Image (cartoon, rainbow, N blue to C red):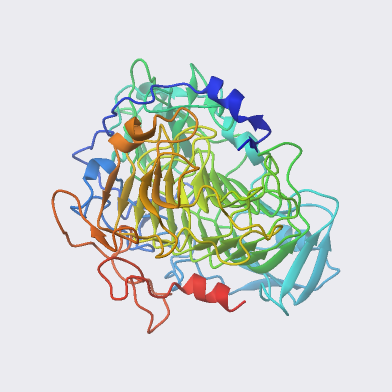
């Protein structure tokens, strides 16, 4: 099937693919020290240390003996405590802001109200429709709150093209802001470390800085055609992580970090790890967008420049809650670039103004080394990629979302939760209802994703896609892990559907409907590919076998979660948590986001 992705033919992409596909890759080393859970947070830009918090109630990423610790990381995402006011977080894990600085009615200026609002207060939008011609720019410590995201609530309509709402001004340029700014690490920084050593350059940094730690590409990175969205200093740097400085010690040249590193960064040749400040514009922190419907935004002037709905860049401790975007939005509905410890939750992102490859018709996108963010309890449907990771920095959690109806032309079944540019790594995909998940390699590979307690049936809800009644007949699978991906973990999921699934493994996207689709795509070596050689899959209940398949170690106890220590406070009473898994009866129960979608 001839297809164009971002305007680049598959034939050309195969020429551009670099790296050592097919080699067995050792996982990144595991540090013996440094606890990535319940890290301290800092009020970005203020220089005050916020101490430890517990918003996510994170667990040790290696706590489950089912997955070796060197294949996971410390998942403790999102906002852990309310640093500016020191108040308890709400049941949704977000700061609670109750003081309204101004209520804005349709016809009045939203931007003027934001600009004049005192810190830690709310600009409240009355019910009705607000028409704006310029992008509304959020600033630090201000919440923009509507009167609801549905009928009878507040709707912002953007005219004239461009992004509706923005947190930060950088757009995609944040991906390259560190060119020529990096300082060398003077010692290796093992995975799970909470500090780095930069020697005499430590004096260049301050507590509260957002920094990026990165290194030059070596195996297992396969860059594909994805030279964009990453820094080029001594070579492309696909493995990168944004993190906050919580302490500076000039005497020993170290920087303390607000989260664990999710990869081992090597100081010497050939990787030459570096760190740099994200300082091309002020970091926006503690800004929130709540209870709104957005319409009319458009993508940027070129692919990947900016989101049509909400564009977030160079941001920390920000949140988007209960926001609806619809088919009037062109391009990405929400994109996070160089974003740290932020949250997208309870949203409804659906349909697109323009379907087609190269049209950026994506839902929720995490990109440009964004790390330790939480995407939870959202509905994302009827886009090319409802949820997408794009050069992410690790420690992100995609959890309890309902993602479905991925658009593609012809009868092709697209991927609901997916990755694009190399080298997204150490990400957790937990508890989602997504018929077709995976990691494709059109623009480069990914590594060490963990798919845990998801339900993936390989059957889209009807109608399958927004602009066609043609049934999906090709690329039917529950989990698609294309060739050159490495170190993927698939544990405790429920996969497939009786009457749909015909085979367990296939190594071609034209094979019969399967549980796993492995090793195909650009550079793929089929069953001999590194993705097969390094795949860990165990404890999954699948429709082909009609039972749970365990590895050589036999049945094991699965934890309820890999990032939560207990049931979320927001979880509806009377609804089972966890809601899916081979250890439940029935194995698939009720996901709140799916129930919410069914009722729309």
511 vs 88, nearest the viewer = 511
Residue depicted at 26% across the width and 30% down the height? 26
Quadrant for residue 8, please give it: top right
Residue 301, placed above or below residue 503: above
Quarter holding the C terminus? bottom right
Residue depicted at 43% across the width and 64% down the height? 499
Location of residue 212 in the rendering, given as x and y in whole percent from the top left corner: 46, 34
Say whether residue 509 is left or right of residue 64: right
139 vs 27, nearest the viewer = 27
Residue depicted at 27% across the width and 51% down the height? 61
Residue 115, placed above or below residue 263: below
Residue 102, placed above or below residue 32: below
Residue 323, placed above or below residue 285: below
Residue 205 visible in the shown view: no
Location of residue 570 in the rendering, given as x and y in whole percent from the top left corner: 43, 75
304 vs 579, nearest the viewer = 579
Location of residue 127 in the rendering, given as x and y in whole percent from the top left corner: 75, 77
Task: Residue lying at the far left in this picture: please name it.
Answer: 553
Say whether residue 490 is left or right of residue 511: left
Report the label total: 0
Residue 471 visible in the shown view: yes
Quarter holding the N terminus? top right
Quadrant for residue 283, please give it: top right
Quadrant for residue 455, please give it: bottom left
Say whether residue 600 is left or right of residue 594: right
Residue depicted at 61% across the width and 73% down the height? 99
Say whether residue 157 is left or right of residue 189: right
Location of residue 507 in the rendering, given as x and y in whole percent from the top left corner: 41, 39
């Amino acid at each position: 099937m001839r297809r164009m992705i971002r305007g680049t033919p598959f034939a050309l992409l195969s020429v551009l693919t670099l790296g050592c596909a097919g080699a067995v890759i050792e996982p990144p080393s595991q540090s013996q020290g440094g606890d990535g859970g319940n890290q301290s947070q800092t009020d970005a830009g203020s220089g005050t240390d916020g101490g430890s918090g517990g918003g996510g109630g994170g667990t040790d990423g290696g706590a489950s003996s089912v997955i070796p610790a060197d294949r996971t990381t410390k998942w403790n995402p999102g906002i852990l405590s309310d640093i500016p006011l020191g108040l308890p977080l709400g049941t949704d894990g977000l700061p609670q802001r109750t003081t309204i600085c101004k209520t804005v009615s349709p016809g009045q200026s939203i931007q003027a109200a934001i600009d004049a609002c005192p810190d830690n207060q709310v600009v409240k939008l009355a019910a009705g429709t607000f028409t704006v011609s310029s992008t509304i720019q959020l600033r630090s410590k201000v919440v923009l709150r509507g009167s609801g995201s549905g009928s009878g609530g507040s709707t912002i309509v953007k005219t004239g093209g461009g992004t509706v709402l923005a947190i930060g001004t950088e757009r995609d340029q944040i991906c390259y802001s560190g060119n020529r700014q990096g300082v060398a690490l003077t010692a290796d920084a093992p995975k799970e470390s909470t500090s780095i050593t930069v020697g005499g350059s430590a004096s260049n940094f301050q507590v509260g800085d957002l920094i990026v730690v990165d290194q030059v590409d070596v195996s297992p990175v396969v860059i594909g055609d994805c030279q964009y969205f990453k820094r080029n200093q001594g070579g492309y740097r696909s493995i990168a992580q944004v993190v906050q400085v919580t302490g500076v010690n000039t005497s020993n040249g170290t920087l303390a970090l607000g989260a664990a590193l999710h990869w081992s960064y090597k100081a010497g040749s050939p990787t030459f790890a570096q760190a740099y400040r994200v300082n091309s514009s002020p970091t926006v922190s503690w800004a929130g967008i709540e209870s709104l419907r957005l319409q009319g935004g458009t993508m940027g002037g070129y692919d990947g420049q900016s989101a049509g709905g909400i564009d977030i860049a160079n941001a920390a401790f920000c949140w988007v809650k209960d926001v609806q975007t619809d088919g009037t939005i062109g391009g990405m509905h929400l994109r996070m670039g160089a974003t740290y410890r932020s949250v997208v939750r309870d949203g409804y992102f659906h349909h697109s103004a323009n379907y087609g490859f190269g049209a950026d018709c994506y839902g929720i996108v995490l990109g440009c080394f964004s790390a330790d963010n939480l995407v939870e309890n959202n509905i994302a449907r009827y886009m090319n990629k409802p949820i997408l990771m794009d050069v992410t920095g690790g420690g992100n959690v995609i959890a309890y979302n309902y993602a479905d109806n991925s658009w593609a032309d012809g009868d092709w079944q697209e991927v609901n939760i997916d990755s694009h540019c190399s080298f997204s790594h150490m990400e957790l995909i937990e508890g989602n209802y997504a018929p077709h998940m995976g990691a494709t390699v059109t623009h480069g590979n990914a590594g060490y994703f963990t798919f845990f307690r998801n339900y993936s049936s390989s059957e889209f809800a009807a109608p399958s896609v927004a602009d066609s009644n043609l049934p999906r007949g090709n690329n039917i699978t529950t989990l698609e892990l294309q060739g050159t991906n490495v170190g993927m973990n698939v544990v405790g999921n429920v996969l497939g559907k009786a009457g749909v699934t015909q085979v367990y493994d296939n190594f071609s996207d034209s094979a019969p409907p399967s549980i796993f689709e492995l090793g195909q795509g650009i550079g793929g070596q089929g069953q001999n590919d590194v993705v097969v050689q390094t795949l860990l899959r165990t404890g999954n209940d699948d429709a082909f076998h009609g039972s749970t398949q365990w590895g050589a170690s036999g049945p094991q106890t699965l934890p309820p979660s890999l990032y939560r220590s207990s049931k979320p406070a927001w979880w509806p009473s009377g609804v089972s948590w966890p809601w899916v898994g081979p250890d439940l009866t029935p194995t698939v129960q009720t996901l709140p986001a799916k129930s919410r979608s069914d009722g729309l």
